[in-house]
Image: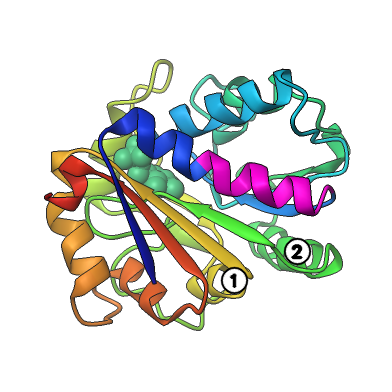
Amino acid sequence: MKIIITRDYQEMSVRAAQLVIDLIKQKPDAVLGLATGRTPIGFYQELVKAYLRREISFAKVKTFNLDEYVGVNRSSRDSFWTYMQTQLFSQVDIRQENINMLDGTASNLQDECINYERLIEDAGGIDLQLLGIGLDGHIGFCEPGTAVDKRTFVVDLTELTMQSNQETFTELKKSPSQGLTMGPATIMEARKILLIANGKNKRAIVKKALYGSVTTKVPASILQRHLDCTCVLDALASGE
Ligand code: GLP
């Protein structure tokens, strides 16, 4: 595991984005695994800037997002779909047909999960998976206790996750209680992993995940076993 400690949120975003910019330059048809949340907003802004500078193009890039809420329409302001369209997709030249996101309103959620795994496989697997980390150590929506061999699945969200995500909602009155998420096994198959974390409130969980024992109680700790995982932290999250 490679750990890069940066001064602040801005530098964390720039350093993390640079890894993806380099990948796209080297492999214009890269398959990216993407994440939502407050943490990657600056990272997406840096990707947009690189696109506007004509350093990179997303014309051949394919994306797969980690997760989505169950029962929330894509048109909702609080869906991860809307988040991705706003933060990145509408601002770059990605083709809509190359965007893959789980549909939390699918009539058969199990089939939706199985189909998502198939789409990832058909795309040749994920070259780089971006991850944030939840306060309880979750990655995607893989909550504590998730078996490491699990693939994309329907998950019951914990109270902590519901509360934390509630703060970001502008439309939904109540947090959905379920999500669809790639499983730890799906995430670990990505050829590269890029975890980003910032802020003092992430310090304790980052320490556990990166330096503690590998346990399903802290889902992100499994990343210690990945052969090509880079963590970009700001000073507050790293404790330095
Ligand atoms: C959500 C997402 C995760 C994200 C986490 C942390 O639960 N499903 O992918 O990493 O929240 O979010 P934030 O970056 O807002 O702290």
Residue that label 1 marks: 186
On residue 231, which mark appears? none
Please provide the residue range marked out in magenta: 17-28
**Image vertical order of residue 49 relative to residue 69, above or below:** above
Between 158 and 184, the one lying in front of the other is 184
Between 187 and 237, the one lying in front of the other is 237
- Residue 89 falls left or right of residue 96: left
Between 213 and 53, the one lying in front of the other is 53
On residue 120, which mark appears? 2
Query: Looking at the picture, how far across and down is residue 67, in whole percent?
Result: 54, 50
Q: Amino acid at mark 2?
A: Ile
Residue 103 makes an appearance in the image: no
Query: Looking at the picture, how far across and down is residue 68, in whole percent?
Result: 54, 44
**Image vertical order of residue 133 relative to residue 18, above or below:** below
Q: Amino acid at mark 1?
A: Thr
Query: Looking at the picture, how far across and down is residue 100, in whole percent?
Result: 74, 46
- Residue 215 falls left or right of residue 98: left
Distance from disc 1 to disc 2, alpha carbons, whole Å, reads: 9 Å
Which type of secondary structure does the marked residue at label 1 adopt?
helix
Which type of secondary structure does the marked residue at label 2 adopt?
helix
Between 46 and 175, the one lying in front of the other is 46
Query: Looking at the picture, how far across and down is residue 126, in whole percent?
Result: 69, 63
Residue 36 belongs to the span the image colors magenta: no
